[in-house]
Amino acid sequence: MVCRRQDIPSGRGWPVQVGQVRLAVFDTDGGLRAVDNRCLHIGNPIDDGPVSGDVLTCPWHGWQYDLRTGQHLTAFGRRPGLRTYPVRADGDEVLVEVPGPPGDR
Ligand code: FES
């Protein structure tokens, strides 16, 4: 469990940490989304970026990502982007699956 659903601001994300992994969780019209909280541009956090549909705009310099797949949306098409994580709600609890380090079983 990383937070409660009501912790996530409308139209924005919420920063959480699981072990060493920093995530941003979003509650979009399409459902909950969880991605790495690190923009691929210069690594700034993206959790405070505005969300429209499933498109997140980085609050720093405007790079855009599809929160369903993490893909980076560019003028030249979709590019590999942010890592995504399985996320679901159990009541008002937001649960994210973050794999442990290799060999951690
Ligand atoms: S840090 Fe995200 S666009 Fe620059």
Image (cartoon, helix red, strand yellow):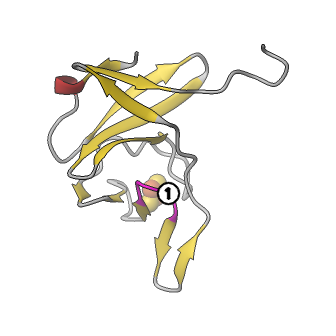
Q: Nearer the viewer, residue 54 or 19?
A: 54
Residue 92: quarter of image: top left
Residue 98: quarter of image: top right
Q: Residue at x 53, y 27 (%)?
A: 97
Three-letter amino acid code of the residue under disc 1: Thr
Residue 27 percent coordinates (x, y): 25, 41
Q: Residues within 10 Å of mark 1 (few under 14, many from 20)?
A: some
Question: In the rendered view, does 33 fall on the left or right side of 71?
Answer: left
The tally of labels here is 1
Q: Is residue 62 above or below residue 77?
A: above
Q: Main secondary structure of the magenta part?
A: loop
Q: Which residue is mark 1?
A: 69
> Magenta segment range?
66-71
Q: Residue at x 41, y 61 (%)?
A: 66
Q: Residue at x 46, y 71 (%)?
A: 73
Q: Is residue 81 above or below residue 76?
A: above
